[in-house]
Amino acid sequence: MINNQEELRQTANQLSAKGKGLLAVDESTPTIGKRLAGINVENTEENRQAYRGMLFTSEGLGQFISGAILFEETLYQNHADGETMVSKINKLGIIPGIKVDKGLSPLAGAHEVETWCKGLEGLAERTAEYYKQGARFAKWRAVLQITADGCPTDLAIRENAWGLARYAKICQESGLVPIIEPEILMDGDHTIETTAEVQEKVLVEVYKACSENKVFLEGTLLKPSMTVSGADNKNKAGSEEVAKMTVRTMNRCVPASVPGIMFLSGGLTEEDASVYLNTMNSIEHKSSTSLTFSYGRALQQSCLQAWSGTNIEAGQKALMARCQANSEASTGDYVAGSQPSSQETLFEAGYKY
Ligand code: 13P
C-alpha cells in the first residue's frame, strides 16, 4: 500500500485539467539531433539549451500546457541566463516530468521488428532522484507494430504491457505519476478496423498487468496513439471515422478511474492532430476521463522552423499557436485553420530508436 496516493491523484488531475495538455520535449539526444539537422542547427548542448530555453520562456504557455516531459539532460540543465530549466517551467505554472525509459531493444523470441523497453533496473533509485530534482510525473514509451504476418505477437504485447505496469508501480512509489504509453506505430497498410482490434487487445493486457501490479489507476495517465489507418493504407479513414473509432476503443478499454488520456501525435501532421482531437471531443465519450494531447512533433514542427536557431520571438509565437489550437481541440472548440499550422507529413517509418 502506498501512502502518497493523494499526491499522485492531485498531480494526475492537474496534468489532465480541462483545456490543457502536455508538451513532449523529451527527445533523446540523437532524436533532437535529427530535428535540429532539419533546420541546419548543430546538435550541441548549447543549441539544445537555446532551443528548449526558448520554449520554456514562452509567456502564457501555462494557459494551455499543464506539464512538460523532459529528457534527463534538461531536468538538470540551466537556462543560458543561469536559472534552472525546472524553475523556468515552474514559473509558467507547468509541471516538469521526465522520460525514464532507456529506449527499445529487439525482443528475442518474437518477430524481428518487435521490441521491449529498457530501464527497469535501477529505476527506483533514479525516480527518487528525479523527484528531488523537481519532476512530478514520468513517461515510458513501449512500442508495438502491426504487420501482415502477425504482429504484434502475443509475446510482444505481454512483455510490453508488463514492463509498463512494473514501471508505473515503481514511479508511484517515488511520488511520480506514470504516463503509460503503449504506442502502436502507423507503419503498414492495414485498415483502421485492424488498428482498433490490435489496440483493444493491447490496452486490455496493459490494464490487466496494472491490476496485477497494484498500480493506483487514479494516479496514472494513458498516452495512446489514436486509432488510425496504417500510413500506407490507400483508403485512409478521415477525421470523423478516426474520432469515432478512437473514442470507441477508449470507452471499451480504459478504466473510468484513469483521469486523463493524453494522445501522442505519432507522425500526424500538426493540423490533423488538432482536428482529430477536436472531433473526438465533439462526440459522446462515456466516461469523464479527459481526452487531450501530449504531442511532440505536432507541437514543435512549425516552432522549430520559425526559430531556426536564433529567432526566439517567432519560435515562441508558433509554439503558442499550436498549443492554443490543441487546448481548444481538447474541449471541442477548435476551428480548423484558425491558427497557423503545417500539413507537412511528420511520419517517419520505423520510428523506434
Ligand atoms: P509525437 O507526438 O511526436 O509522437 O511524440 C510524442 C511522444 O512523446 C512519443 O513518445
Image (cartoon, rainbow, N blue to C red):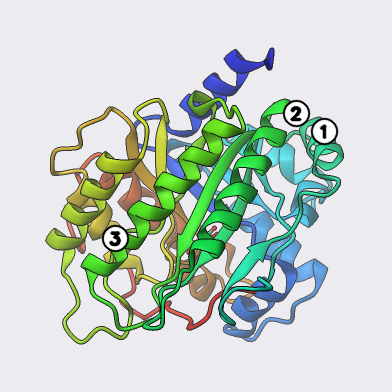
Residue 284 picture location, percent across and down: 14, 38
Q: Which amino acid does label 2 sit on?
A: Ser
Look at the numbered discs 3 and 2 and tell me whether their residues touch, using CB distance below 8 Å.
no
Which of the two residues, 35 or 164, is positioned nearer the viewer here? 164
Helix, strand or loop at label 3? It is helix
Look at the numbered discs 2 and 1 and tell me whether their residues touch, using CB distance below 8 Å.
yes
Residue 75 picture location, percent across and down: 76, 47
**Label 3 environment density (alpha carbons within 10 Å; few <14, some 14–19, many ≥20):** few
Task: State which tag comes first along the sequence, 2 or 1.
Answer: 1
Could you tell me which residue is drawn at 19 percent across and 44 percent down?
Answer: 333
Select label 1 or label 3 by which is in front.
3
Task: State which tag comes first along the sequence, 1 or 3.
Answer: 1
Could you tell me which residue is drawn at 73 percent across and 59 percent down?
Answer: 118
Helix, strand or loop at label 2? It is loop
Q: Is residue 119 above or below residue 333?
A: below
Which of the two residues, 129 or 117, is positioned nearer the viewer here? 117
Say which quadrant the N terminus sits in: top right
Residue 94 picture location, percent across and down: 57, 36
Say which quadrant the C terminus sits in: bottom right
Residue 111 in view (yes/no): yes
Measure how far apart labels 1 and 3 are at the Cα level.
Answer: 37 Å
**Label 1 environment density (alpha carbons within 10 Å; few <14, some 14–19, many ≥20):** some
In the picture of the structure, the residue carrying the numbered disc 1 is 128
Could you tell me which residue is drawn at 39 percent across and 73 percent down?
Answer: 186
In the picture of the structure, the residue carrying the numbered disc 2 is 174
In the picture of the structure, the residue carrying the numbered disc 3 is 197
Q: In this view, does 91 lie above or below 117?
A: above
Q: Is residue 244 left or right of residue 25?
A: left
Q: What residue type is labelled 1?
A: Ala
Which of the two residues, 281 or 307, is positioned nearer the viewer here? 281
